[in-house]
Amino acid sequence: MADPTAAPAANYAQYPSLIDRTVLVTGGADGIGSAVVEEFAKQGAQVAFIDIQADKAAATIKRCRDHSPRHIPVFYNVDLVDIAALQAAIADAQQQFGSLTVLVNNAASDDRHTWEEMTPEYWDDRLNVNLRHFFFAIQSVAPQMIERQNGSIVNIGSSSYMMQEDFFPGYAIAKSGVEGITRTMARTFGKDNVRVNTVLPGWVATERQLAKWWSPEGEEGTLNDQAIKRRIYAQEFAQMVLFLAADDGAACTAQQFLVDGGRR
């Protein structure tokens, strides 16, 4: 049976500048984050990733070992809500790699909820899970990037708030804040040649999305809204992240890049 999360066969670009480039990915155990980790490993980058899902992280590492045995990622089993633990993991990765030149802020949770059931505690949880750690990860990696006068920070956003999707207000509101972080930090770090961009997925066919949220009616509606009439896959999404991390994206900062099949 074909893997419903596998992208169509493609001859993706190879970026010489990503060979041995040091990369940190948050939320890299499954879904989009796992694809980003794997695609960086295929490029020959040195990759570390942070996640709370140790079993899925092991599967990601195995896939990387199978296709990139010389570039096996380093995994940190950390809950990103714990900022002190996040900062400690980043410090360890910096020590192992010498420095970090790429940060991909990806970790998030799009659990469904309504505005009526929102409590102050769940509101704080949604912002902590989907936004707060983005800033503190940047705060941790930026000093070395500034010292090296080179770096790329890629924040993974969501098109949900742009499309006015209303089935997870805490998530959508937090994700709208990602663009504020990107544009503010891009201006702050631009003089030091550190770039900050956002990449926004539309509906990407990951294992989680297909298991928890997929329905025939939902997919029909999504494809009707897309210019490209097929599913969008995590491996495809990762290619935009690679471009922004490579020297090829050196003139791009403070921008939003939608990878959504031309969804309206």
Image (cartoon, rainbow, N blue to C red):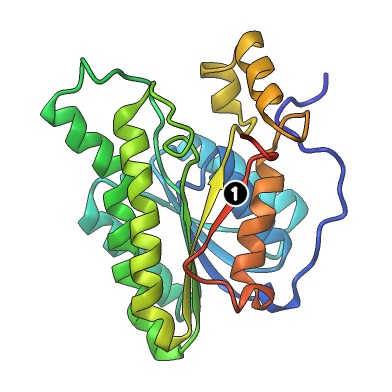
Q: Is residue 84 left or right of residue 143?
A: left
- Under tag 1, what secondary structure? strand
Q: Is residue 199 left or right of residue 93?
A: right
Q: Residue, x 82% and y 23% (percent of image)?
A: 2
Do we see residue 91 in this rendering? Answer: no
Residue 224 picture location, percent across and down: 70, 22
Q: Residue, x 21% and y 15% (percent of image)?
A: 116
User: Where the N terminus falls, by quadrant?
Assistant: top right
- Examine the rendered structure and indicate whether residue 130 appears above or below residue 76: above
Q: What residue type is disc 1 on?
A: Leu
Residue 23 picture location, percent across and down: 53, 67
Q: Which residue is mark 1?
A: 258
- Examine the rendered structure and indicate whether residue 219 appears above or below residue 77: above
Do we see residue 166 in this rendering? Answer: yes
Q: Nearer the viewer, residue 165 or 3?
A: 165
- Examine the rendered structure and indicate whether residue 239 appears above or below residue 188: above
Q: Nearer the viewer, residue 97 or 16?
A: 16
User: Where the C terminus falls, by quadrant?
Assistant: top right
Q: Residue, x 71% and y 46% (percent of image)?
A: 236
Q: Residue, x 65% and y 45% (percent of image)?
A: 62
Total marks in image: 1
Residue 65 picture location, percent across and down: 69, 52
